[in-house]
Image (cartoon, grey):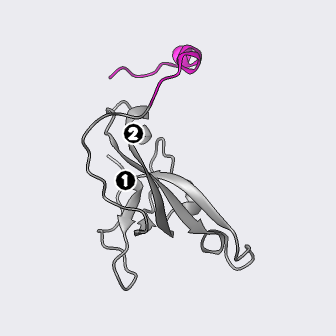
Amino acid sequence: MRVLRAQDVGKVLLKGGPARVNEPVSPRFRPGDRVHTRTINPTGHTRLPRYARGRRGVVDRDWGVFIFPDSSAAGRGAKPQHLYSVRFEARDLWGPAASARDAIYLDLWDDYLDPVEVGGSAAAPPDTPHR
């Protein structure tokens, strides 16, 4: 895979291109599954907002398989995986001052999520930086 150079950014943005890929990747989650976002602090690119790290949400929708931007931006390949719309209660992100009626939906990739077991604990090992 070619690494994007700064002088080529304008051309790429004008051209555009799909990030969806047609690869047979099994989904890890289904709508209704409870998930826990990883607490990661990579030195490079990530699309997992800091305010949502280490938080619990519910998968609302599976958008399909897409290029994983963290890996792609670092020149480590497409690393195709499912992209999910995850619903977070506003109070779970910003505390009791947030409206109890509000929710935030974030589109998050498999590598950002771990399942939540019945009883509430995360099922995966402690978070590690992306490779």
Residue 54 visible in the picture: no
Which image quadrant: the N terminus?
Answer: top left
Q: Which mark is residue 76?
A: none
Q: Which mark is residue 66?
A: 2
The residue depicted at 37 percent of the width and 86 percent of the height is 119
Residue 122 versus residue 52 in the image, above or below: below
Identify the amino acid type marked 1: Asp
**Residue 28 is drawn in which quadrant?**
bottom left
Range covered by the magenta-colored residues: 1-18
The residue depicted at 31 percent of the width and 46 percent of the height is 131
The residue depicted at 70 percent of the width and 77 percent of the height is 100
Q: Is residue 99 magenta?
A: no
Q: Nearer the viewer, residue 54 or 102?
A: 102
Picture coordinates of residue 95 (x, y %)?
67, 76
Residue 63 versus residue 96 in the image, above or below: above
Q: Which mark is residue 110?
A: 1
Q: Residue furthest bottom?
A: 119
**Mark 2 falls on what kind of element?**
strand
Q: Nearer the viewer, residue 42 or 25?
A: 25
Q: Residues within 10 Å of mark 2 (few under 14, many from 20)?
A: many
Q: Assess whether mark 1 and mark 2 are in contact (beta carbons under 8 angstroms).
A: no
Count of marks placed on residues: 2
The residue depicted at 73 percent of the width and 73 percent of the height is 98
Q: Residues within 10 Å of mark 1 (few under 14, many from 20)?
A: some
Q: Is residue 5 magenta?
A: yes
Picture coordinates of residue 59 (x, y %)?
46, 63
Q: Is residue 101 left or right of residue 32?
A: right
**Mark 1 falls on what kind of element?**
helix
Identify the amino acid type marked 2: Phe
Picture coordinates of residue 113 (x, y %)?
40, 60
Residue 29 versus residue 79 in the image, above or below: below
Q: CA distance from mark 2 to mark 1?
A: 10 Å
